[in-house]
Image (cartoon, rainbow, N blue to C red):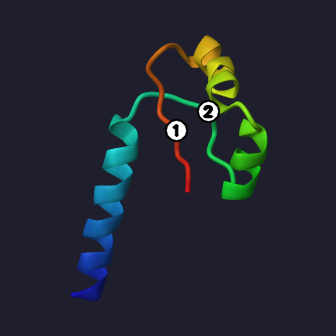
């Protein structure tokens, strides 16, 4: 039963990420926060040039 529940949860989480639009690679929280710097609206504009106006971000 535990194996079945683990498989269902794993499948649920992987399907959610497959359906999201592309975006920059997720890193550790600290690295993402350091990359954003003092002006997050400007630092988020750079990945938008690469991935387009709609992208996924994972923070936290």
Q: Can you name the residue that lies furthest to the bottom here?
A: 1
Quadrant location, the N terminus: bottom left
- Whole-Å distance between the Cαs marked 2 and 1? 7 Å
Please give the label number shown on residue 24.
Answer: 2
| Residue ID at (32%, 76%) | 6
Q: Is residue 4 above or below residue 51?
A: below
- Quadrant in which residue 36 is drawn: top right
Could you say where residue 3 lies in the image, as x and y percent from the top left?
30, 82
- Quadrant in which residue 44 is drawn: top right
> In the displayed structure, does residue 55 sit left or right of residue 8?
right
- Front residue of 5/38: it is 38
Please give the label number shown on residue 57.
Answer: 1
| Residue ID at (78%, 46%) | 34
> In the displayed structure, does residue 33 sit left or right of residue 9?
right
Could you say where residue 45 lies in the image, as x and y percent from the top left?
63, 19
Could you say where residue 9 lies in the image, as x and y percent from the top left?
30, 68
Quadrant location, the C terminus: bottom right
- Quadrant in which residue 2 is drawn: bottom left
- Front residue of 2/19: it is 19
| Residue ID at (76%, 39%) | 35
> In the displayed structure, does residue 15 sit left or right of residue 38?
left
Mark 2 against mark 1, which lies toward the viewer? 1
Q: Is residue 52 above or below residue 20?
A: above
| Residue ID at (28%, 58%) | 12
- Identify the mark nearer the N-term, 2 or 1: 2
Q: Give SS at disc 1.
A: loop
Q: Is residue 24 above or below residue 45?
A: below
Q: Give SS at disc 2.
A: loop
Q: Residues within 10 Å of mark 1 (few under 14, many from 20)?
A: some
**CB atoms of marks 2 and 1 within 8 Å:** yes
Q: Can you name the residue that lies furthest to the front here?
A: 38
């Amino acid at each position: 039963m535990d194996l079945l529940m683990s498989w269902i949860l794993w499948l649920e989480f992987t399907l959610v990420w497959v359906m999201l639009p592309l975006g920059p690679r997720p890193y550790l929280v600290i690295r993402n926060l350091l990359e954003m710097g003092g002006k997050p609206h400007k630092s988020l504009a750079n990945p938008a040039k690469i991935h387009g106006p709609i992208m996924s971000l994972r923070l936290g």
